[in-house]
Amino acid sequence: MSKGITITFLGTGTSHGIPVIACHCEVCTSKDPHDKRWRSSIMVEANGMTIIIDTGPDFREQMLREKVQKLDAVIFTHEHKDHTAGLDDIRAFNFDGRAMQVFASQRVQDNLKKTYEYIFADHKYPGVPVIELHTIHNKPFSIGGVEFIPIEVKHMNLPVLGFRIGDFTYITDANFIAEEERKKFRGSKYLVLNALRIEKHISHFSLEEAIAMAQDLGAEHTYFTHISHQLGLHTEVEKILPPGIHLAYDGLKISY
């Protein structure tokens, strides 16, 4: 694993994003830019490579905001639409017909082939995205010399993949992590976990559960993501978080 890795939080919101359509709560109407959250995704830059984890519905806007000029690969954590709905827009990076390298479990690939049948059709319409699929198993893999260690978590009953990239671990859409999987990312300097809201949820960590998990894992820096408007205002939640734990926000960058 090379040094010189930069992680950009492209989005830190849950499936509705913030503001939520037709909602007038104090979070959705907040003027604080930290309370504006696109759907969760990160960008990994290392070894001259640009790699995206999840292409949600806001993928196009995220690429424009960050002025991304090239994209080498996409990795999917799971098949839910708030993580895959922007896949069509990878065609902007199919320079000279170069296929986008897409990494996903076989289950996720099967879902993508159903959802985006036109992309994978035998006889393709001109201009559709060009994709080359790679199957992820629960074992390390590399993209351009950048190593990714998959971590299988549970999103209620659905297996979802998180990833460790050197000293950084990214986990979204989880409410259970087995001890065997936790061993893979103990010792990470930076940890990202989902923290949906204050109240308990059937498939996401609540704030209390995320804090407990973060304290058990003991990373030097923990950031919460996949946040809903029900969690509260960014500045107010920050005040009650233990030392070393923060809310991530759109555009946040971590370099290590």
Image (cartoon, helix red, strand yellow):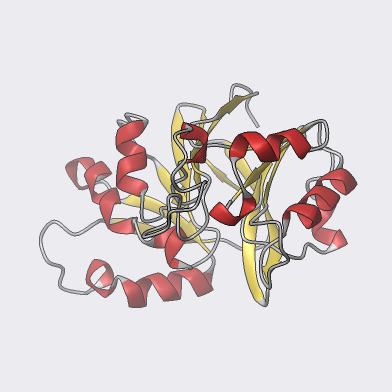
Figure quadrant of residue 152 = bottom right
Query: Residue 205 in the image: x percent, y percent?
Result: 72, 60
Q: How many marks?
A: 0
7 vs 26: above or below: above
Figure quadrant of residue 148 = top right
At x 43%, y 75%, the residue is 111
112 with respect to 32 (left or right): left
Residue 41 shows in the view:
yes
234 with respect to 129 (left or right): right
86 with respect to 109 (left or right): left
Query: Residue 82 in the image: x percent, y percent?
Result: 44, 61
Q: Which quarter of the figure is the N terminus placed in?
A: top right
Q: Which quarter of the figure is the C terminus placed in?
A: top right
Query: Residue 76 in the image: x percent, y percent?
Result: 50, 57
At x 51%, y 40%, the residue is 35
Task: Name the one closer to the observer, 137 or 62.
Answer: 62
Task: Name the one closer to the observer, 89 or 173.
Answer: 173
Figure quadrant of residue 172 = bottom right
208 vs 237: above or below: below
Residue 166 shows in the view:
no
22 vs 170: above or below: below
At x 66%, y 70%, the residue is 203
Q: Residue furthest left?
A: 126
At x 49%, y 37%, the residue is 250
Query: Residue 228 in the image: x percent, y percent?
Result: 56, 54
